[in-house]
């Protein structure tokens, strides 16, 4: 096992993010939009598949629970955590509709939807973005290098400069933590 090589590859992707003013600017933009969403009483929804679903749940928990310090909770939800809903809609409609149907049931103007997909081509997230647009919900795509099809529909795309799924996911959680830290400190300064 080439442990040092793997760590070096992860560090190189993160260095590419540091070196990209566009990516840094998009992270700042998402953070500002999320703070505005919360100040206006909105909710931030997250969705993903597989490891990206785990990341969605992780980031939602940091916002709704706490990140660095004790403070009031922020309204954040990962859309996949209700397994009865998920399996019913996937069975009765299609797996491609699981997130879009949920968004149509709960979203309101001023909310945000963050879709996490390393390829940027997850049909169920793309469909959720389409549904979100119907309600004035801002959409954010966390993707890999190409941005996939999500780049064409998202309001803001943060496309990690890599095509290697594990390196992309490592960067997604880092970016999620950065957003959580800044949102927490803006909403509830110490």
Image: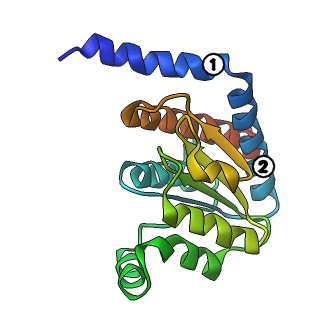
- Residue position marked by numbered label 1 in the rendering: 18
Q: Looking at the image, is mark 2 or mark 1 earlier in the sequence? A: 1
Residue 171 locus on image (x, y percent): 49, 32
**How far apart are labels 2 and 1 at the CA level?**
21 Å
Q: Is residue 54 above or below residue 45?
A: above
* Residue 79 seen anywhere in this rendered image of the structure: yes
**Where, by quadrant of the figure, is residue 104 drawn?**
bottom right
- Give me the residue at 45% from left, 33% from top: 163
Query: Can you tell which of label 2 and label 1 is closer to the viewer?
Result: 1
Q: Is residue 169 above or below residue 71?
A: above
Farthest residue toward the bottom?
92
The quarter of the picture where the C terminus appears is top right
The quarter of the picture where the N terminus appears is top left
- Give me the residue at 54% from left, 62% from top: 125
The tag on residue 127 is none
Farthest residue toward the left?
1
- Give me the residue at 63% from left, 19% from top: 18
* Residue 78 seen anywhere in this rendered image of the structure: no
Q: Secondary structure at mark 2?
A: helix
Q: Say which of 105 and 64 sits in front.
A: 105
Dots 2, 1 in contact, CB < 8 A? no
Residue 100 locus on image (x, y percent): 57, 73
- Left or right: residue 46 versus residue 9 is right
- Left or right: residue 81 versus residue 149 is left
The tag on residue 33 is 2
Q: Is residue 34 above or below residue 167?
A: below
**Where, by quadrant of the figure, is residue 101 drawn?**
bottom right
**Where, by quadrant of the figure, is residue 40 drawn?**
bottom right
Q: Secondary structure at mark 1?
A: helix
Residue 182 locus on image (x, y percent): 68, 37
């Amino acid at each position: 096992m080439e442990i040092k090589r793997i760590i070096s590859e992860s560090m190189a992707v993160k260095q590419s993010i540091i070196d990209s003013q566009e990516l840094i600017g998009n992270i700042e933009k998402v953070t500002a939009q999320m703070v505005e969403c919360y100040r206006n009483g909105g909710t931030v929804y997250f969705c993903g598949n597989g490891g990206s679903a785990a990341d969605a749940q992780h980031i939602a928990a940091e916002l709704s629970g706490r990140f660095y310090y004790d403070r009031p909770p922020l309204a954040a939800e990962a859309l996949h955590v209700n397994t009865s809903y998920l399996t019913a809609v996937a069975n009765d409609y299609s797996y491609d509709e699981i997130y879009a149907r949920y968004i149509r049931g709960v979203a309101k103007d001023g909310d945000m939807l963050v879709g996490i997909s390393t390829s940027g081509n997850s049909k169920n997230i793309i469909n959720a973005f389409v549904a979100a647009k119907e309600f004035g919900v801002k959409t954010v795509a966390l993707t890999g290098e190409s941005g996939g099809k999500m780049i064409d529909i998202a309001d803001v795309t943060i496309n990690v400069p890599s095509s290697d799924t594990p390196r992309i996911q490592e960067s997604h959680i880092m970016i999620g933590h950065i957003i959580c830290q800044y949102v927490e400190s803006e909403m509830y300064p110490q």
